């Protein structure tokens, strides 16, 4: 089976998705971008009321229906209040590692559509002035956004149309290196979403059909815990494709596809996990089986909502999750190959 275009395709889709701001709750634009890709490949694209995207692929055996999912909502910030000096206090959307945001460029979307730029900074930002410039806590009490506008008061900021509840988009700083690394914020989980789009393109280009009726499900609100709480009726299995964890006593690297046996919500379906391990071995993939100590997925959301499905979780190994993340093409490739194997292709 030819995978010669995968590297170009997966990095192209990753750049598209990572270049489209989509913190949890503001995901219409990225779902629209996915819809255009799907429709350009000749697939019918549907949206749920909640805003998730779905592509239904008829399988060779219509007696079973499965889903593969990736989430396209990301971490971010939202304006919480405006200081008397015209700084923006913020609240986190999801769980970014706040100290990594010190000095990051950002954009602020006013509700009337105007966009402004700024920088996330410590409230002790100058070493020549503040004795605690290096030691002050980096959290939402001790950090704020400095606007790139001539503002000196709360009223000046409000006159720009900026108010509490406006989104703050963080610059992902997406880079693909000559050595094959993808480094960016929000590879969790746009790296996996790019993998699923590449698999879709492969099904189209090679005129392949999965073994069973398959829904490609692009969820939103995953970062706040209820991405795939709703699933279409009739599914028997859900394979979540999300980032694999790296660090501490885990086995996964950036070059592997990670198969999760258990996360914070408990074990995944034993039969599905065993099947994925067997497929990885049969296809001679670089893989690891790990337990994620602080993690939840779309499968957990689906189970918590009462969906009667088997569930498993795989994904490319991602270093420095919820910070400045990085993975390698080989990890993405092994993930795509395992998805293809799961689909019977």
Image (cartoon, rainbow, N blue to C red):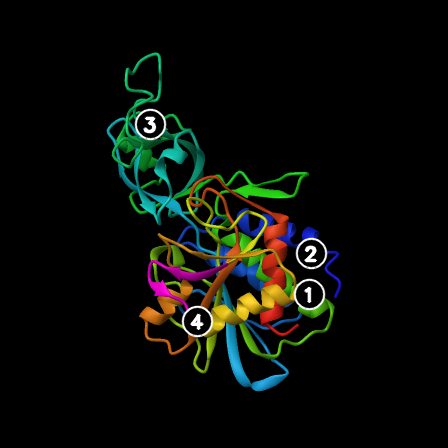
Say if 249 sits above or below 315 in the image.
above
Verify CB contact (< 8 Å) between mark 3 and mark 1. Answer: no
Question: What label sits on residue 6 in the rendered view?
Answer: 2
Residue at left offset 65%, top offset 43%:
180
The residue sitting at 65% across, 51% down in the picture is 12
Nearest to the observer: residue 55 or residue 66: 66
Q: Is residue 3 left or right of residue 312?
A: right
Q: Are marks 3 and 2 in contact (CB under 8 Å)?
A: no
**Distance Cα–Cα, label 2 vs label 1:** 8 Å
Q: Earlier in the sequence, mark 3 or mark 1?
A: 3
For mark 4, does the 10 Å Cα neighbourhood hold few (<14), some (14 to 19), or many (20 or more) residues? Answer: some
Q: Position of residue 29 (x, y in %)?
A: 50, 55
Q: Is residue 192 left or right of residue 49?
A: right
Magenta highlight range: 259-269
> Which residue, given by chain and number where applicable, does mark 3 sit on?
122
Nearer the camera: disc 3 or disc 2: 2
CA separation in Å, label 3 and label 1: 46 Å
User: What residue does disc 1 label?
Assistant: 202
Tell me where residue 254 appears, x and y as whole percent. 55, 47
Callout 2 environment at 10 Å: few (<14), some (14 to 19), or many (20+)? some
The residue that label 4 is drawn on is: 270
Is residue 253 in view from this perspective?
A: yes
Name the dominant secondary structure of the magenta segment. Answer: strand
- Between the C-alphas of marks 4 and 1, the distance is 29 Å
322 versus 241 height, above or below: above
């Amino acid at each position: 089976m030819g995978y010669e275009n995968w590297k170009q395709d997966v990095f192209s889709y990753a750049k598209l998705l990572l270049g489209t701001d989509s913190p949890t709750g503001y995901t219409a634009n990225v779902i629209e971008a996915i819809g255009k890709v799907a429709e350009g490949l000749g697939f019918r694209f549907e949206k749920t009321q909640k805003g998730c995207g779905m592509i239904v692929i008829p399988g060779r055996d219509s007696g079973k229906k499965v889903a593969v999912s990736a989430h396209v909502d990301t971490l971010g910030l939202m304006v919480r209040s405006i200081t008397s000096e015209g700084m923006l206090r913020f609240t986190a959307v999801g769980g970014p590692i706040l100290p990594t945001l010190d000095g990051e460029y950002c954009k602020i979307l006013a509700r009337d559509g105007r966009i402004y730029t700024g920088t996330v900074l410590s409230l002790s930002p100058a070493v020549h002035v503040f004795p605690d410039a290096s030691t002050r806590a980096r959290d939402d009490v001790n950090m704020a956004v400095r606007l790139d506008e001539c503002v000196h008061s709360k009223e000046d900021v409000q006159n720009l149309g900026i108010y509490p509840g406006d989104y703050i988009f963080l610059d992902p700083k997406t880079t693909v290196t000559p050595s094959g690394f993808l480094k960016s914020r929000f590879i969790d989980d746009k790296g996996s979403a790019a993998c699923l789009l590449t698999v879709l393109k492969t099904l189209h280009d090679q005129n392949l059909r999965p073994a069973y009726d398959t829904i490609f499900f692009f969820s939103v609100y995953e970062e706040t815990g209820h991405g795939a709480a709703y699933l279409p009726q009739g599914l028997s299995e859900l394979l979540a494709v999300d980032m694999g964890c790296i660090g501490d006593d885990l086995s996964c690297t950036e070059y592997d596809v990670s198969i999760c046996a258990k996360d914070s919500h408990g074990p995944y379906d034993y039969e599905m996990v065993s099947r994925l391990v067997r497929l990885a071995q049969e296809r001679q993939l670089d893989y690891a089986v790990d337990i994620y100590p602080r993690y939840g997925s779309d499968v957990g959301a689906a189970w918590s909502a009462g969906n009667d499905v088997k569930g498993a979780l795989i994904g490319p190994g991602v270093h420095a999750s919820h910070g400045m993340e990085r993975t390698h093409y080989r990890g993405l490739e092994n993930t795509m190959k395992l998805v293809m194997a799961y689909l019977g292709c």
